[in-house]
Structures are given as C-alpha cells and as structure tokens.
Amino acid sequence: EIILVTGVQTCALPICAAGRQRPGIATRMSGATHRISADDLVYIPAPDAAFLPGRVEGFERDGTVLVRLSSGGQSSCAGGEARRVPATEVRPRFERNDGSTSEDNTSLVHMNDATILENLEGRHQQDKIYTYTASVLLAVNPYKEITGLYGDEQCALYRGKHIGALPPHPYAIADASYRALTREAKRSEEHTS
C-alpha cells in the first residue's frame, strides 16, 4: 500500500511492482512527487539543526514515517534514535561521501529545502560562498575575507562569459545583466531609426 499525500488530503493506494507489494509513500512537495520507500535516505526537520539525516525504517497507518537518525548530524540528537514524523515532512536525500558540492542547485539529485541547505553549507565550508539556482545567485556570508574573490583580474575572467561557464560569482550576474541591457538598447535604437 502506498500513502499518497497531496496537500491536506492523505489517501492509501495499492501499488504492485512486478507482482509484489512494495511499502512506501509518495509525497508531493512544490509540485514534484517523490516516492519514498523503506531504507531510503531522507532528511527530517529538527528544531535545533534545520534538518537531520536519517534512513526510513517503516510506515505507520496514521501517515507517519519511522526514521532512524544517522550519526554525525549537527544536533543534540544521538545517531541511531528513531523518530516518527508526518510523511509531508520527509525530504529525499542523496549522500555524497566525497565532499563535492554543486555550483548550481538545479543539478542536485533531489532539489528540496534540506538538500539546498546541505549544498550551501558544504560550499560555505569550502569558502565557495556563491551558488546558483538557475540564473539566481545565492550568497552566504563567509564572516571573513576570502582573498582573490574580487578585483580587476577576477572581473576580467567573467567578461563576456555566460552564466555557469565559470564558478558562481556576482561578476557573472553583472556581466550578463550589462550585456542584456546593451542588447536591449541596440534593439530600441534600431526600432526608432
């Protein structure tokens, strides 16, 4: 049986995969439906750490999910603790053990609030304070000076480049905006001539 959560309604739907039942849920967040099954890696909200990593252990009839917390979270909660959370609060998670991050959040395996925060935190720890979400630039205050981040040489690198051709930076946004304005000015001139 699958529990489908859509907005405020929860309904149970039978699911058969290759002739056998596979317990799980499908949750709908921000217009996307995610199927979550037993043993999947997930995030759940936490009052003192935004989100905690865990693994799905099972599903309850009341629409809650049993999640076993992973150790190493930045919370006062001990790893191995089990929590019941509403299905709507469970976020799919993809574990990267190599320390890599994404320059653009739209390339994340699961794009949700928890994985975006995880990506931003990882980039911040590597002094990569800028991250794209498509053509939007997100900045996280480093609370320190990062040498080589700004200057004429850095600005010249981004001149004439498309967003995403180089690592995220305000110079990329500024250059793209400038080129769009000059293109629009040329079009306006051509129409008035």
Image (tube, rainbow, N blue to C red):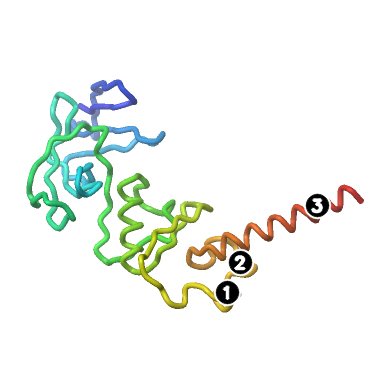
For badge 2, the amino acid type reads: Lys
> Residue drawn 51% across and 52% down?
136
Residue 111 pos. (x, y %): 37, 47
Residue 175 pos. (x, y %): 62, 63
Look at the numbered discs 1 and 2 and tell me whether their residues touch, using CB distance below 8 Å.
yes
Residue 84 pos. (x, y %): 13, 35
Residue 180 pos. (x, y %): 69, 56
Left or right placement of residue 79 versus residue 193 in this view: left
Spatial separation of the CA atoms under disc 1 and disc 2: 8 Å
Which of labels 1 and 2 is toward the front? 1
Q: Residues within 10 Å of mark 3 (few under 14, many from 20)?
A: few
Badge 3 or badge 2: first in the primary sequence: 2
Q: Nearer the viewer, residue 27 or 184?
A: 184
Q: Write down the residue under mark 2.
A: 161
Q: Secondary structure at mark 1?
A: helix
For badge 3, the amino acid type reads: Arg
Spatial separation of the CA atoms under disc 3 and disc 1: 27 Å
> Residue drawn 34% across and 25% down?
7
Q: Secondary structure at mark 3?
A: helix
Q: Residues within 10 Å of mark 1 (few under 14, many from 20)?
A: few
> Residue drawn 24% across and 39% down?
90
- Is 36 drawn above or below residue 72 in the view shown? above
Q: Write down the residue under mark 3.
A: 187
- Hey, which quadrant is residue 30 in on the image? top left
Q: Which mark is residue 1?
A: none
Look at the numbered discs 3 and 2 and tell me whether their residues touch, using CB distance below 8 Å.
no
For badge 1, the amino acid type reads: Leu
> Residue drawn 48% across and 67% down?
167
